[in-house]
């Protein structure tokens, strides 16, 4: 998938939209399907290479991006390992979250860079937190990149310490975070 294939409009309607006019594409949140795997590979690659540019050096981002193949078969295999939620825009995966329900851990969270800051990642997190609560998990954990950590803290996650992971000879900084999950009546 090329960058131009992804939508650039937001998932939320504009307050300036006139009645009867077309609004931006709608985002649907659902369980991943095998056909999403190729899109996941591209979302991951571009989120790391473009989205993380302000937080990691080029060498760090290249090592990080090479840690997982840019190949659909690798990502479909990961779907068998983790509960995977996707943000679908007009039939294409534009964001995803991998969840280890048994461990209460969010494994990954990536959104197409041009769609960042539109609530897609936050909504994926809300769905993941609900799923964890339904499994009886009271605390969620994540090892978050420098790019993601501050946003999670603003969402109620607590810092539990610094962490470093090695990818392709590069040491990448991240933070261990935890969140107490509380059921909310709706």
Image (spheres, rainbow, N blue to C red):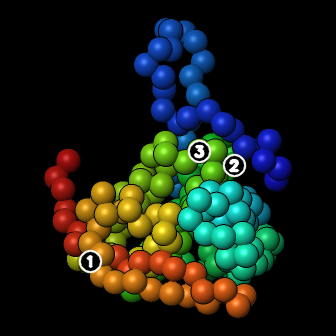
Pick the front one: 105 or 130: 105
Near mark 1 (Cα within 10 A), the count class, few <14, some 14-19 or many ≥20, is some
Pick the front one: 82 or 144: 144
Q: Residue at (30%, 57%) from the top-left corner?
A: 154
Spatial CA distance of label 3 from label 1 is: 28 Å
State which mark lies toward you, 2 or 1. Answer: 1
Pick the front one: 64 or 103: 64
Q: Would you name the residue on which mark 2 appears?
A: 92
Asked whether residue 75 is in view, the answer is no
Image position, residue 127 (x, y; %): 39, 59
State which mark lies toward you, 3 or 1. Answer: 3
**Which comes before the other along the chain, label 3 or label 1?**
3
For residue 72, what is the image quadrant?
A: bottom right
State which mark lies toward you, 3 or 2. Answer: 3
Pick the front one: 61 or 114: 61
Q: Residue at (48%, 69%) from the top-left corner?
A: 146
The answer to whether 37 is drawn above or below residue 91 in the figure is below
Q: Would you name the residue on which mark 3 appears?
A: 115
Near mark 2 (Cα within 10 A), the count class, few <14, some 14-19 or many ≥20, is many
Disc 3 is placed on an element classified as helix
Q: Residue at (60%, 18%) from the top-left corner?
A: 22
The answer to whether 185 is drawn above or below residue 137 in the figure is above
Image position, residue 10 (x, y; %): 56, 35
Q: Would you name the residue on which mark 1 appears?
A: 139
């Amino acid at each position: 998938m090329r960058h131009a294939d992804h939508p650039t409009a937001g998932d939320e309607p504009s307050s300036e939209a006139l009645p009867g006019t077309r609004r931006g594409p709608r985002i649907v949140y659902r369980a991943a399907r095998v056909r999403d795997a190729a899109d996941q590979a591209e979302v991951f690659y571009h989120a790391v290479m473009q989205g993380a540019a302000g937080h990691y050096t080029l060498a760090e981002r290249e090592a990080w991006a090479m840690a997982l193949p840019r190949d659909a078969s690798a990502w479909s295999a990961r779907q068998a390992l983790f509960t995977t939620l996707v943000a679908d825009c007009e039939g294409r995966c534009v964001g995803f979250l991998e969840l280890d329900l048994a461990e209460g851990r969010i494994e990954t969270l990536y959104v197409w860079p041009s769609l960042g800051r539109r609530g897609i990642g936050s909504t994926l997190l809300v769905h993941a937190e609900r799923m964890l609560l339904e499994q009886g998990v009271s605390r969620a954990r994540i090892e978050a990149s420098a790019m993601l950590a501050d946003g999670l803290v603003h969402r109620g996650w607590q810092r539990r310490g610094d962490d470093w992971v090695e990818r392709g000879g590069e040491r990448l900084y991240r933070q261990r975070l935890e969140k107490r999950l509380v059921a909310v009546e709706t």
